[in-house]
């Protein structure tokens, strides 16, 4: 059975005290209000991971993710953080290939394949992000484009390795814009991606991979999105910065 996951991508937001306050509020609210087996993954700026680990220590459904890692093991790469460093502080997940990394830091499908390998080699689960631009949706085979992102960055993995990967479909035109993909649009892509995984790994493996939707998810839109059969949860940006709103999204899963 694939996991239900709600992940919060804080991006480059929150100062230290705010990060602690948000995390403790979320843990308290989830403790009081959230039933069921949803996994909550917080993706704060890496500088806070060690501190926040203490605040989720008694919340078994909570986990932490870094927002990025290097494809290299160690060495003269100023400013970078390796998967081994994340492993050494107990981080279990890492976002790989967020569209902002692809766009502002020029990360290619080939580089992302190497980052996926780096994470998996340290026992860290990649949350692999993919998605098309508005121009691609309007003018190209946009489903083929997203399938190709998965082919080029994930299809070298063994089935066993793939089972440690979470996929997040995030249409670029929906990220931070307030424009959410409709549940039909998201389901169409999620189903196509699951079939794409099945074509290579078989349907038993594909059925076990969690595919999250991201792009302007709010408490108001979450329930309808999460009800779609191939949408296993969400990767939430802006709305994950407010404890009340994010808890309501977790409750919708
Ligand atoms: P958003 O961001 O929810 O603010 O659109 C989602 C993301 O970038 O992961």
Image: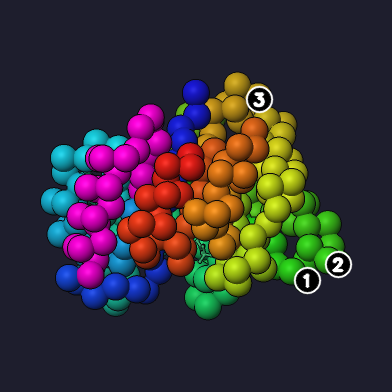
Residue at left offset 74%, top offset 69%: 134
Of helix, strand and loop, which mostly describes the magenta segment? helix
Check the image and tell me how it is coloured.
rainbow
**Cα distance between the residues tagged 1 and 3:** 32 Å
Residue at left offset 58%, top offset 60%: 215
Residue 135: numbered disc: 1
Image quarter of residue 229: top right
The residues colored magenta run 18-41
Residue at left offset 25%, top offset 40%: 31
Q: How many marks?
A: 3
Horizontal and vertical percent position of residue 159: 54, 30
Horizontal and vertical percent position of residue 32: 26, 40
> Is residue 109 visible in the rendered structure shown here?
no
Q: From what the image shows, is residue 188 above or below residue 206?
A: below
> Dot 1, how many residues are within 10 Å of its Cα: few (below 14), some (14-19), or many (20+)?
few
Which of 61/121 is in front?
A: 61
Q: Secondary structure at mark 1?
A: helix
Residues at badges 1 and 2 in contact (C-beta under 8 Å)?
A: yes
User: Disc 2 designates what residue?
Assistant: 139
Residue 30 magenta-highlighted: yes
**Cα distance between the residues tagged 3 and 2:** 31 Å
């Amino acid at each position: 059975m694939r996991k239900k996951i709600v992940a919060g991508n804080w991006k480059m937001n929150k100062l230290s005290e705010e990060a602690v306050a948000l995390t403790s509020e979320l843990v308290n609210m989830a403790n009081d209000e959230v039933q069921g087996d949803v996994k909550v993954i917080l993706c704060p700026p890496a500088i806070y991971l060690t501190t926040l680990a203490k605040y989720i220590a008694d919340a078994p459904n909570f986990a932490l993710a870094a927002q990025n890692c290097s494809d290299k093991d160690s060495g003269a790469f100023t400013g970078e953080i390796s998967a081994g460093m994340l492993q050494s502080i107990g981080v279990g997940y890492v976002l790989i290939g967020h569209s902002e990394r692809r766009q502002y830091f020029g990360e290619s499908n080939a580089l992302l394949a190497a980052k996926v390998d780096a994470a998996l080699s340290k026992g860290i689960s990649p949350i692999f992000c993919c998605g098309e631009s508005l121009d691609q949706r309007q003018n190209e085979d946009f489903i083929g484009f997203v399938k190709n992102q998965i082919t080029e960055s994930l299809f070298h993995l063994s089935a066993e390795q793939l089972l440690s990967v979470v996929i997040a479909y995030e249409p670029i035109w929906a990220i931070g814009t307030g424009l959410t993909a409709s549940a039909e649009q998201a389901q169409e892509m999620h189903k196509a991606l699951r079939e794409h995984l099945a074509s290579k790994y078989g349907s038993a493996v594909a059925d076990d991979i969690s595919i999250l939707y991201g792009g302007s998810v709010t408490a108001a839109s979450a329930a309808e999105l999460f009800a779609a059969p191939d949408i296993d949860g969400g990767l939430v940006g802006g709305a994950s910065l407010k404890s009340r709103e994010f808890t309501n999204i977790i409750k919708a899963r």
